[in-house]
Image (cartoon, rainbow, N blue to C red):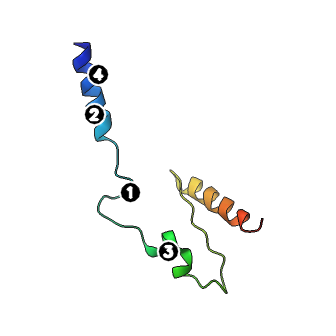
């Protein structure tokens, strides 16, 4: 009985794993990989951040921005 329960739990948890994108079947915009495809290097400093929440993503982007200044 315990084995059936553990197998059911493992199956349920594995079905919750996403493929890595927020919406399956959608690709990321070009500027996510290279922000300068959208923003001119001569006029902008552009960084991209990621995180589980918008606040986490903004903190991550801020860290990337700070690292550009050494």
Task: Locate residue 36 relative to residue 12 in the image: left or right.
Answer: right
Q: Nearer the viewer, mark 3 or mark 1?
A: 3
53 shown above or below 1: below
Q: CA distance from mark 2 to mark 1?
A: 19 Å
Q: Position of residue 15 (x, y in %)?
A: 28, 40
3D distance between C-alphas at marks 3 and 1: 17 Å
Q: Image point 45% across, 75% down: which residue?
A: 30
36, above or below 27, in the image? below
Mark with earlier residue (2, 1): 2
Q: Which residue is mark 2?
A: 12
Q: Nearer the viewer, mark 1 or mark 4?
A: 4
Work out which quarter of the rendered image holds the C terminus and state it: bottom right
Residue 1, image x, y percentages: 21, 12
Real-space CA distance between mark 4 and mark 3, rounded to the nearest whole angstrom = 43 Å
At a point 57% along the width and 66% down the height, the residue shown is 48
Residue under label 3, please give it: 31
Q: Which mark is residue 62?
A: none
What separation in Å lies between label 3 and label 2 (alpha carbons)? 35 Å
**Which picture quadrant has residue 21?**
bottom left
Mark 1: few/some/many CA within 10 Å (<14, 14-19, 20+) = few
Q: Which residue is mark 4?
A: 6
Where is mark 1, residue-wise? 22
Residue 55 drawn at (x, y percent):
58, 55
Q: Residue at x 26, y 32 (%)?
A: 11
Residue 29, by quadrant, is: bottom left
Q: Position of residue 36 (x, y in %)?
A: 56, 79
Q: Is residue 61 left or right of 6 when viewed as pictured?
A: right
Left or right: 18 in relation to 38: left
| Crowd class of label 4 (few under 14; some 14 to 19; many from 20; radius 10 Å) | few
């Amino acid at each position: 009985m315990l084995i059936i329960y553990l197998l059911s739990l493992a199956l349920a948890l594995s079905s919750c794993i996403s493929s890595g994108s927020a919406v399956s079947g959608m690709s990321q915009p070009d500027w996510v990989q290279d922000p300068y495809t959208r923003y001119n290097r001569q006029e902008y400093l552009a960084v991209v951040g990621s995180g589980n929440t918008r606040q986490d993503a903004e903190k991550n982007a801020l860290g990337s921005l700070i690292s550009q200044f050494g």
